[in-house]
Amino acid sequence: MVIALVVLVVLLLVVIATQYRAYRARSSSLELIHHKLKDIIEGGTSEKLLVFTDDRALIPVLVEINHLLEHNQQRAANFLKMEQSMRKMISNISHDLKTPLTVVLGYIETINLDPDMDAAKQKVLLSKVHAKANEVLQLIRQFFDLARLESGDEPMPLSRIHMNDICEKNILAFYDTLTVKGFEVAIEIPDKPMYAWGNEEALDRTLNNLIANAIQHGGEAMVVGLTLRGDDEFVYVDVWDRGKGIHELHQDRVFERMYTLEDSRNKSYQGSGLGLTITKRLIEAQGGTIRIHSKPYEKTVFTVRLKRIAFGA
């Protein structure tokens, strides 16, 4: 009986010692975790929490803490990127508004300083003032359009769209301009009707933007094309040209707000860096995507993809 009690006491002491050791090890690990977390948060670094432990209860906690750190670090990086983008955008907006307004003030000052200016010359200057004022107004409208699209406050109504008609209407709107300038126009629109889920007004604006962009930047090769195609799930519209194109390093950024690198097509489009950004937002608001593939002086293609609706559906 005494032996049994001794064995029991020894076992209890072993259990207590083991638990105490585990408690001390866990306390040490938690203290280490606390200090490392504090250093990471205060330092604002992108480090992960590296703590080696055999404690099976702590391992999943450490994994989730690292997931949380990664998530917060990504959010911080995105915020910093957005802040830098906004600063650049504000700087570009100021420049883009200041330039035409300075020209307007110059024309008005010329008119005011010459009261004896003949009517014909005054009419020419006033015409230039009017054109520049319209340029400023168009730029302001683009800023508001982009802000409205990105806020998501106004949902875009979607319906069944006859893509053949939309594509034909928009390319034909430019046909006279293209032929007068001597462009070759390649149009591939199938006879079989294709329907997609979209918004007609937004699609008109999208295709108008892309075709105008292709004319402006594909002028060297004097070729512009539009192709409508599809598969079982999607409808695709390709608007292409054979101009100077966009370097591969810049292709992922041409849809960014106010992206104005020298090789970016956004730089000169309608005098701002918003044309392709608005185009992308319009497509995304319809549940679609837009991408670019470019080989300079060979072929530059902007491809719009929308959800297809079966014929007769």
Image (spheres, rainbow, N blue to C red):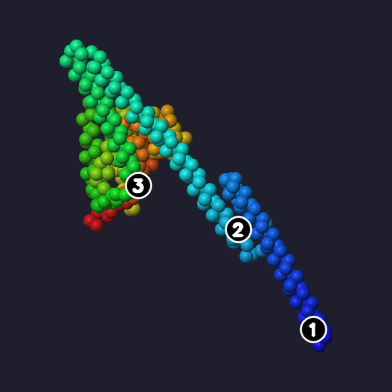
Task: Please state which of residues 38 and 165 is positioned toward the viewer in this rendering.
Answer: 38
Q: Which residue is mark 3?
A: 151
For image coordinates 35% across by 36% down, the residue present is: 274
Q: Which residue is mark 1?
A: 5
Instruction: Identify the element where label 1 is drawn.
Output: helix
For image coordinates 23% across by 19% down, the residue present is: 125
Percent x, y for residue 208?
Answer: 27, 37
Numbered circles on residues, count: 3
Residue type pointed to by label 1: Leu
Which image quadrant: the C terminus? bottom left
Which image quadrant: the N terminus? bottom right
Task: Judge whether 16 appears above or below 113 on screen.
Answer: below
Whole-angstrom CA distance, mark 2 to mark 1, is 42 Å
Residues at discs 2 and 1 in contact (Cβ within 8 Å) = no
Q: Is residue 128 left or right of residue 55?
A: left
Q: Which residue is mark 2?
A: 62
Q: What is the crowding at mark 3: few (fewer than 14 residues within 10 Å), some, or many (at least 20)?
A: few
Instruction: Identify the element where label 2 is drawn.
Output: helix
Q: What is the crowding at mark 1: few (fewer than 14 residues within 10 Å), some, or many (at least 20)?
A: few
Instruction: Tell me if I can see residue 265 in this picture.
Output: no
Residue type pointed to by label 3: Ser
Q: Is residue 249 left or right of residue 69?
A: left
Task: Judge whether 153 appears above or below 179 on screen.
Answer: below
Instruction: Tell me if I can see residue 96 in this picture.
Output: yes
Residue type pointed to by label 2: Leu
Percent x, y for residue 215?
Answer: 30, 30
Task: Please state which of residues 126 and 247 is positioned toward the viewer in this rendering.
Answer: 126
Instruction: Identify the element where label 3 is drawn.
Output: helix
